């Protein structure tokens, strides 16, 4: 069981789960002035949406480990699971089980909110994860952008499906539509934050894994353009993240969300520390620490959504 949890990267799945719970229960519904599950998505529909997202995410991790098993033996000795603790055939079977299951659940929840066409989002996501692992991750920058985009998708999915569920209830839709502009802005804020931090973390991981990627012919940015140029991109992304948090703070100040305004000074500080550490980083261990640091930065940013419940 412990080996399986490591295989599916349970901490990352927990972050996805918490993000989806917080964006609906502590951001969207309070902004719309409704109680938890009072309007829109039911508990069952929301649970299916979460499971669909988690299953497709697990499938993405499994197929990525499958394509990366040789490089991971070099980059992460002792940590790679595929081909050692887990046979390749089992990984392939699990990939199809979770991916087909995730797409199937996505189709079901789309049907339940009367938007069956939007089940293509789940097919698209599963396909992008396959092509990322098989092809895009070894194309400079493109692979990083694909992962960053997919990392933001869970926020947008919750708001999209909540809107669909609301649109089928004319009375409920009328009561909450005044909150749509603020909900749109807040969801966009957290999607932007997730995109920038995910992009930054992927660039740092590419620098960390440069030797193994180069050895096995994976042409990431660090391999093609070198560590120094990749480091410049990481510095620019960190600066962009800092600028974005300052812009977010200004919005919170205008909206008189004072707790969030104060909380984001912590995010500012963390970005500044990250910027300094990125400039100083030289060894593989430095970039590994930075990659883990950015994950915690992402978590701290996501947890700020709890405060919105008390601001509106």
Image (cartoon, grey):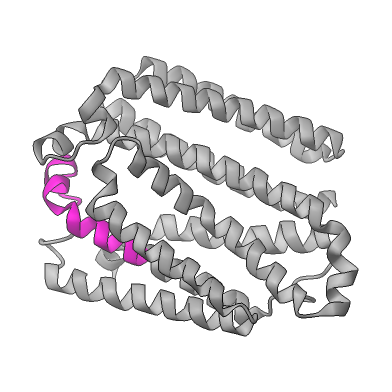
Residue 227 position in % (x across, y down): 27, 22
Residue 197 position in % (x across, y down): 49, 38
Drawn side of residue 62 relative to residue 128, left or right: left
Drawn side of residue 48 relative to residue 181, left or right: left
Q: Residue at x 77, y 30 (%)?
A: 250
Q: Residue at x 48, y 70 (%)?
A: 120
Residue 158, located in which quarter of the rendered image?
Answer: bottom right
Residue 291, located in which quarter of the rendered image?
Answer: top left
Q: Is residue 40 visible?
A: no
Q: Residue at x 42, y 69 (%)?
A: 123
| On screen, residue 54 above or below 152 | below
Residue farthest to the front?
A: 117
Residue 304 position in % (x across, y down): 67, 45
| On screen, residue 307 above or below 25 | above
Q: Residue at x 31, y 34 (%)?
A: 288
Q: Is residue 214 visible?
A: yes
- On-image quarter of the N terminus: bottom left
Count the marks.
0
| Residue 291 belongs to magenta span | no
Residue 295 position in % (x across, y down): 45, 42
| On screen, residue 138 above or below 181 | above
Main secondary structure of the magenta stretch: helix
What is the magenta range? 58-80
| Residue 60 belongs to magenta span | yes
């Amino acid at each position: 069981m412990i080996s399986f949890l490591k295989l599916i990267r349970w901490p990352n799945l927990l972050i996805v789960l918490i993000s989806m719970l917080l964006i609906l229960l502590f951001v969207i519904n309070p902004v719309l002035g409704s109680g938890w599950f009072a309007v829109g998505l039911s508990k069952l529909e929301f649970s299916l949406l979460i499971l669909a997202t988690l299953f497709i995410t697990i499938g993405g991790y499994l197929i990525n480990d499958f394509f990366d098993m040789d490089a991971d033996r070099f980059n992460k000795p002792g940590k790679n699971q595929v081909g050692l603790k887990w046979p390749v055939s089992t990984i392939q079977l699990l990939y199809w089980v979770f991916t087909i299951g995730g797409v199937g659940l996505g189709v079901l929840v789309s049907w339940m909110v009367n938007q069956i066409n939007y089940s293509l989002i789940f097919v698209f996501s599963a396909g992008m994860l396959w092509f990322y692992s098989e092809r895009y991750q070894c194309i400079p920058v493109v692979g990083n952008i694909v992962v960053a985009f997919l990392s933001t998708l869970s926020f947008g999915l919750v708001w999209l499906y909540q809107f669909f569920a609301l649109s089928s209830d004319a009375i409920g839709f009328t009561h909450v539509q005044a909150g749509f502009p603020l909900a749109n802005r807040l969801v966009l804020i957290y999607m932007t934050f997730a995109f920038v931090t995910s992009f930054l973390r992927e660039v740092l991981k590419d620098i960390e894994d440069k030797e193994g990627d180069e050895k096995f012919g994976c042409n990431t940015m660090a391999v093609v353009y070198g560590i120094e140029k990749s480091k410049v991109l990481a510095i620019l992304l960190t600066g962009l993240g800092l600028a974005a948090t300052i812009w977010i703070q200004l919005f919170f100040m205008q909206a008189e969300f004072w707790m969030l305004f104060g909380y984001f000074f912590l995010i500012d500080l963390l970005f500044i520390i990250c910027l300094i550490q990125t400039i100083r980083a030289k060894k593989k261990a430095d970039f590994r620490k930075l990659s883990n640091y950015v994950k915690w930065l992402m978590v701290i940013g996501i947890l700020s959504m709890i405060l919105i419940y008390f601001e509106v």
